[in-house]
Image (tube, rainbow, N blue to C red):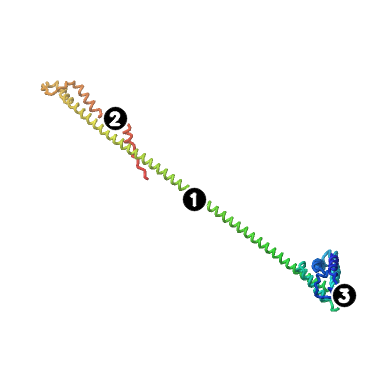
Amino acid sequence: MAAKFSTALALAILPLSSAAVVGRGQNFLGNGMQPEVVARTLSSVEDEWKAQAAVFAECNGTDALPGAAIVSCADAPSSFGKSCNTVVGAIIQGSGGDKDVAKEYMDDVCSQKSISGWHQQQCHSLALAVRGSMSADKYANRMGFDSVKLCGSFWSSFLEGEKQRMAKEKAEREAAEKKAAEEAAEQERKFEEDRKKEAEREKAAEAERVKQEAERKKLEEAERVKEEAKAKAEEAAARLAQKKAEAEAVQEAAKKKLAEAEAAERESKKAEEAKASAAKADAKPVVAAATPAAPVESQKKPAEPSQPKAAAPVAPKPASVKVAVVKEVAAKPPAEKPVPAAAKKAVAAPVVEKPKA
C-alpha cells in the first residue's frame, strides 16, 4: 500500500519542465507539478509511515512476549525506506537538483488546504530533511543523491517523534481514562450520596408522617375520651336530676300522706272524743237510776217514796238491763276511726334523704 501511494506521489511530482527547473520562483502550478494532488497523496503516504512506525514501536516493546516472533519487526523500516526513497527521488528529480526549487515546491505542497495538523508538520519535516541533504551542485544532486541515507535518518527521527507522540497520546488517553474513571466514580459517589440523602429524606418524611398520624390519633382519642366523659357527665347529671325529682316527688307525696294521716288522726280523735262524750252522756243517767236499786236494803227498810223529777221524759228501764249496758260500755274501748292504708304506708315510710349533687 505504501509503495502504491509513493509511486502515485512520484508520478505527480515528476512532470516538471526544464523551464521550471531553470527559472526559480516561477509559478509551478502552471507547469504541471499539481501541488494539491501531491499534498493529498503525501498525506496518505504519511498515514502509512505512521502505521509502520506504530507497528515497529509496538513490536520492539513486545519482543519478550509470547507470539512476538510471528511479526517481523524488520518489515516496517524496510517498507518505510522503499516508500521514502521513491518520494525523495521524485522531489530531487522534479526540482532538477536545485535545492531552492525543491524548497519552494515543498512549501507550496505543505501549505495546501488538503493537508493540515500532524500531516502538515510531517510534510515540513520531510522538506527540511531533503533540502538539508541536497548540495549546491544541481548535477550532483540529480545524479548521485543518497536517498537511502536520508530516508534512514528521517526514519529514525520520524520513529522517535512517533514514539513520543504515541507516549503522549497514551499518557493523554490514560489521563483521560483516569479522569473519566474519576468522574464516573465521583458521579457514582454523588449518585450514592444523593440516593442516601433521598432515602434519609424519605425516611424522615415517613417518620414525620407517622408522628403526625400518631398525634392525630392521640388528639382524636383525647377528643373521644372527652366526649365520652362529657356524655357520661351529662347522663349522670340527668340521672341525678331524675333521682332528685323522684326524691322530691316522694317527699311531697310523703308530706301529703303525712298531712292526710294527721288530718285523719285528728278526725279520728274528734270522732273518738265525740263518741266518748256521747257515751258519757248516755252512761250518767243509767248509773243514777241504778243506784237506789239495792235489793238487800230495800227488804230491810221500806223505801221512802221519792218525788219524781220534773224533767224525766225518758222511760225508765229495768235495773238489770241498765247495769249490763254500763258494764259493756265501760269494758269496750273507744272505737277508732279506720285510717286509710295509703296514709298508714305514708306515715310508716322513711323520709328519703335528698341526694347530694
Q: What residue type is labelled 1?
A: Leu
Say if 275 sits above or below 18 in the image.
above
Quickly name the residue at label 2: 338
| Kind of element beneath mark 3 | helix
In this view, the mark in front (2 or 1): 1
Q: Is 222 or 66 nearer to us in this picture? A: 66
Quickly name the residue at label 1: 219
Residue lying furthest right in this view?
143
C-beta proximity under 8 Å, tags 3 and 2: no
- Location of residue 85 in the rendering, given as x and y in whole percent from the top left corner: 86, 71
Q: What residue type is labelled 3?
A: Arg
Can you tell which quarter of the image residue 280 is in?
A: top left
C-beta proximity under 8 Å, tags 2 and 1: no
Q: How dense is the environment of label 3, judged by Cα within 10 Å: few (below 14), some, or many (20 and up)?
A: some
Q: How dense is the environment of label 1, judged by Cα within 10 Å: few (below 14), some, or many (20 and up)?
A: few
Closer to the N terminus: mark 1 or mark 3?
A: 3
Q: Is 162 or 233 nearer to us in this picture? A: 162
In this view, the mark in front (3 or 2): 3
Q: Can residue 166 be seen in this view?
A: no
Q: Can residue 24 be seen in this view?
A: yes
In this view, the mark in front (1 or 3): 3
- Location of residue 248 in the rendering, given as x and y in whole percent from the top left corner: 34, 40
